[in-house]
Image: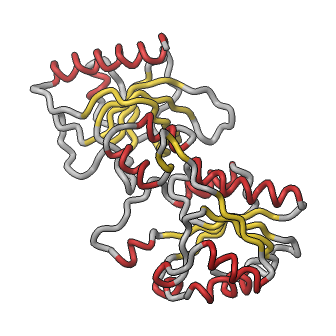
Amino acid sequence: MDDVDLGGRRLHLAIGMFDGVHLGHQSVIEAAVHSANARSAMSGVLTFWPHPSALFRPEDPTRQIMDPVSKARLFIELGADLVIEQPFNRSFSGVTAEEFLPYLRKRLPGLESIYVGENWRFGRGRVGDVSLLVSLARREGVDVVSMPRLQFNGEAISSSRIREALTEGRIEEANSLLGRHYFTRGVVTAGRGLGRTIGFPTLNLPWSGDLRPRYGVYGVRLRDPEQTGSEWFRGVANYGVRPTVEDAGDRPLLEVHVLEERCPFDAGAALQVEWLFFVRPETRFSGVEELQAQIARDCDQARSRFFNS
């Protein structure tokens, strides 16, 4: 991490991996933001990339729910003035727990308080916990606030719980844990036009993600992410490798059929797709006619959810 010029302002800093920016993460970040606002100070988020497992377990790293750019956008939306991404490399991984606070203070001379989750660990070998952080911070004149883990249906909200829900297609549970809709952003690309020939034109987003949700059909809503307050359109999306018509192997595609009478999007358009509910798993059909009939049923089921709920 390079030295950060805070312009003489004091800094209230939330620290964590914050993968997914779920409800628990939001409570940590919002505490830092509120505290900074109350003191006319600066709020910031210190996060890390890649996940430490990429360094220590490269053959089987923890798949990430969200990419760094999307995370940073959400931090700003939550009110953070500053986002710092610390590369998690061999050098940083060697910083001991006792060295961690001086490391931060040197680079962030205005650091006034730190906000973390109650189970946060730090330092080489992850030996540091909140009680050690409090003790070390006291020597540096830094306050520490640890936020309790939030519960949902009697279990702690966690990134690992969200990963499991996504990979099993339990998108509504994932959304409840996230405190918002799981979303995908991308640019629409021109396709082969097969959907149009069978009566279900689609917008194609060649998106795979680090953590891939379960392949299948979802009810979604979509809009232009660059236009604040732009209109949402409802749709049915297939995420997968299209085994009936192509079988794209390891190159999944997100295809969205818009249910509204008009669709203002075309190739080259930026698109944000929010995943709302799971319809069915991706299936290999005997041919295009069987696929066409199933898509019609998928659309009817989605319309029933959208317009009769």
Q: Quadrant of residue 72?
A: bottom right
In the image, residue 12 above or below residue 204: below
Residue at x 48%, y 39% (from the top left corner) = 153
Q: Observer-nearest residue: 145 or 31?
A: 145
The foreground one among 295 and 29 is: 29
> Is 138 placed left or right of 244 in the picture?
right
Q: Is residue 158 left or right of residue 208?
A: right
Q: Is residue 28 left or right of residue 12?
A: left
- Residue visible at 44% across and 73% down? 52
- At 36% from the left and 30% from the top, the residue drawn is 278
Vertical side of 4 occupied by 106: above or below? below
Percent from the top left, x then y, of residue 295?
A: 28, 21
Percent x, y for residue 73? 62, 53
Q: The N terminus appears in which quarter of the rendering? A: bottom right
In this rendering, would 19 be left or right of 131?
Answer: left
* Location of residue 189 with respect to 121 vertically, above or below: above
Q: Report which quarter residue 148 is drawn in.
A: bottom right
217 w.r.t. 106: above or below: above
Give the x, y percent position of residue 277: 41, 29
In the image, residue 186 lies at what x, y percent? 47, 45
Viewer-nearest residue: 136 or 74: 136
